[in-house]
Amino acid sequence: MTLDFMSFNPLTRIVVPISSFILAFGMLASQHIENNTQRNEIQLPKTVTLIELFTSQGCSSCPPADELLSSVLDQPNVIALSYHVDYWNRLGWKDPYSDKLFSVYQRSYASQLNSRVYTPQMVVNGKLEFVGSRKATLTSSLSKKSETVAINNIQAERANGNLKATYSLDKSLSYDKVYALLVL
C-alpha cells in the first residue's frame, strides 16, 4: 500500500513537515547539548590522588600496608609512592631502601598535619594521614573527588646526565603549591 502525500488535506501537508522539522531540530539540538557537555567534561582539569606510604623493612606492621598500597597501583589517576624511612635502622638491621630524606619528609607532614611520626603511615593528597593498613580509610579517601590537579603538557628531556623538565600551569586555576615528583 502506498500513501500519496498530496492526497492529505492541505493542513496535514503543512503540519507534518513542520512537525518533522521541529522534531529533527530538537533531536539535533539535544545531541549538540550532549556533545557540548562531553566537551566540557573533557576540558575539566584532570585530578589525581596522591597516596604516600611511610614504611620500613624493619617494621613488623608494615607488610599489610605495603600490600594495601600495591592494591591501588593500577587504579586510574592514582599515584602511589612508598618511602622507606631510616629511623628503624638504629635497631640494628639497616633497610637498604631507607633514606634520611624520607624521614625528614615524614616529619614535615607530621608538623603540617599536627600528627606524629610512625610506620606504617599513609598520607593522601598531603591532607589526610592514617595508619597505612586501614583499608576502609583508604577506600573512603579514594571514593572522594580529589582536588589535586595533574599538570598537563610536561616536557622532559635528558642530556649529559641531567633531566630538564618544563611545564605550564593553567592560568584559570589558582595553585597553593606545585609539586614535581620524579618517579623512576
Image: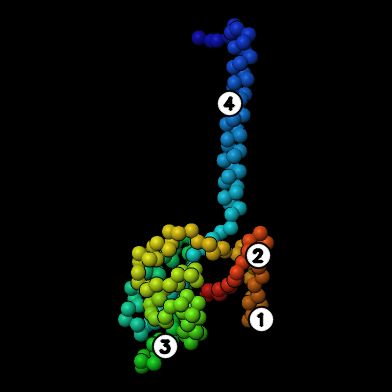
- Looking at the image, is 142 positioned above or below residue 31? below
The residue under label 2 is 169
The Cα atoms of the two marked residues, 3 and 1, are separated by 35 Å
Task: Say which of 64 and 4 sits in front.
Answer: 64
Q: Which residue bears the numbered disc 4?
A: 23
Judging by the rendered image, the residue that carries numbered circle 3 is: 87
Image depth: mark 3 or mark 1 in front: 3
Left or right relative to 29: residue 145: left
Q: Earlier in the sequence, mark 3 or mark 4?
A: 4
Query: Residue 97 in the image: x percent, y percent?
Result: 44, 83
Q: Dot 4: few (<14), some (14–19), or many (≥20) neighbours within 10 Å?
A: few
Please state if 60 lies on the left or on the right of 89 as rendered: left
Whether residue 110 is visible: yes
Q: In what element is the residue under mark 4?
A: helix
Rounded to the nearest whole Å, what is the CA distance between mark 2 and mark 4?
Answer: 44 Å
How far apart are the alpha carbons under marks 2 and 3?
37 Å
